[in-house]
């Protein structure tokens, strides 16, 4: 079994953008990314700080009964603030934890904030991204725009790769070792088919990075389960199967998936530096996406 073809997120940092350098304009998507980067850069002053009036960043977490989850998310937000001093960064939850997103948005109005970008701290599309967050945003007392979820994206794969190495994955495996190895990408799961599409794309990106098969699996709702995926890989002669935790923070799902690992299991992505960079990337892309049609109106 060979790794699946790599599928890249069109909103990923591209050659030719300020994130990567160089020039590469072989598609309309690349050209639009260049334009978006230039528009976004106009919102940043010479010292790297956001100009006054830039929309607030609201990170939207799911919420968890596990206290480690809230602690992890708060630490991640501190990393985001350190990367973008001067940008107002707030937290809102869909459920289970406070502050709830509705309360955070109401609080922004009380502070005099007029605009906000909501970045879902979710790793794939699904019901929360498609319905819950947009509905909360539509009823907000401030102007809002909703960014894409964090995955799929190469920065997410950077975090997954690092966490696997921290757990014991050898990036310098021999060819023989790679033929015996594989990874199960453990995600939460959703009934929304778009969620499975995004998780498969993340698995493809990780497979291309590792040079071994990566099979997506789920903690609930969707199939296959993590134990089923592990058994399928072992049946194909993959004796060393690692579990890559595709969760933002510790919790029941992440713990259960890790316990199913026959070899090594990586920690949740949490406060990895790439996660903070990815939150800001989604924020910037949402601003740029809004700026492009507004620029078109001015030019018409």
Image (spheres, helix red, strand yellow):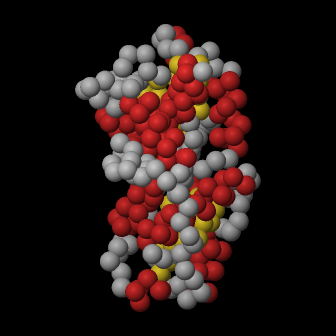
Locate residue 120: give its quadrant.
top right
Note whether 202 is above or below 2 in the view shown: above
Q: Is residue 152 left or right of residue 53?
A: right
Quick check: can you spot residue 288?
yes
Q: Is residue 28 above or below residue 193?
A: above
Picture residue at 48% right of the left edge, 65% below the top:
206
In the image, residue 1 sits, relative to residue 132, either above or below, namely below
Q: Is residue 105 visible?
A: no
Q: Position of residue 121 (x, y in %)?
A: 53, 42
Say which quadrant the C terminus sits in. Answer: top right
Residue 256 picture location, percent across and down: 57, 62
Residue at left 59%, top 87%? 236
Residue reaching furthest to the front: 300
Asked if residue 46 lies left or right of residue 24, the reply is: left
Q: Residue at x 47, y 36 (%)?
A: 35
From the top left corner, tell me how far across and down residue 100 is, in percent. Answer: 58, 28
Q: Residue furthest left?
A: 47
Residue visible at 69% across and 40% down in the picture: 130
Q: In the rendered view, does 22 fall on the left or right side of 253?
A: left
Count of number-bearing discs:
0
Q: Where is residue 240 shown, x and y percent of the image?
A: 47, 81
Q: Nearer the viewer, residue 230 or 297?
A: 297
Camera-side residue of 34 and 241: 34
| Quarter that holds the N terminus | bottom right
């Amino acid at each position: 079994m060979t790794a699946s073809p790599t599928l890249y997120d069109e909103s990923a940092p591209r050659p030719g953008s300020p994130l990567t350098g160089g020039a590469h304009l072989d598609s309309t998507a690349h050209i639009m990314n260049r334009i978006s980067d230039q528009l976004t850069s106009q919102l940043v002053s010479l010292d790297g700080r956001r100009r006054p009036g830039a929309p607030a960043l609201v990170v939207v977490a799911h919420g968890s009964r596990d206290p480690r989850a809230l602690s992890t998310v708060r630490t991640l937000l501190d990393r985001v603030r350190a990367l973008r001093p001067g940008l107002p960064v707030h937290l809102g939850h869909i459920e289970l934890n406070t502050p709830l997103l509705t309360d955070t948005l109401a609080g922004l109005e009380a502070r005099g904030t007029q605009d906000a970008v909501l970045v879902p701290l979710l790793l794939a599309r699904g019901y929360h991204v498609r319905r819950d967050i947009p509905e909360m945003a539509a009823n907000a007392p401030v102007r809002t725009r909703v960014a894409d979820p964090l995955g799929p994206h190469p920065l997410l794969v950077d975090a997954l790769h690092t966490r696997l190495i921290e757990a014991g994955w050898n990036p310098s495996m021999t060819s023989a070792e790679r033929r015996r190895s594989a990874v199960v990408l453990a995600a939460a799961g959703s009934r929304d088919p778009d969620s499975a599409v995004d998780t498969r794309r993340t698995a493809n990106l990780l497979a291309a990075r590792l040079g071994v098969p990566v099979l997506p699996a789920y903690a609930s709702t969707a199939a296959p389960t993590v134990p089923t995926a592990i058994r399928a890989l072992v049946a194909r002669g993959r004796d060393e199967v690692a579990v890559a935790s595709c969760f933002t923070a510790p919790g029941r799902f992440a713990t259960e998936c890790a316990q199913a690992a026959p070899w090594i299991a990586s920690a949740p992505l949490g406060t990895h530096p790439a996660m903070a960079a990815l939150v800001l990337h989604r924020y910037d892309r949402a601003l740029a996406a809004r700026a492009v049609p507004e620029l078109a109106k001015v030019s018409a």
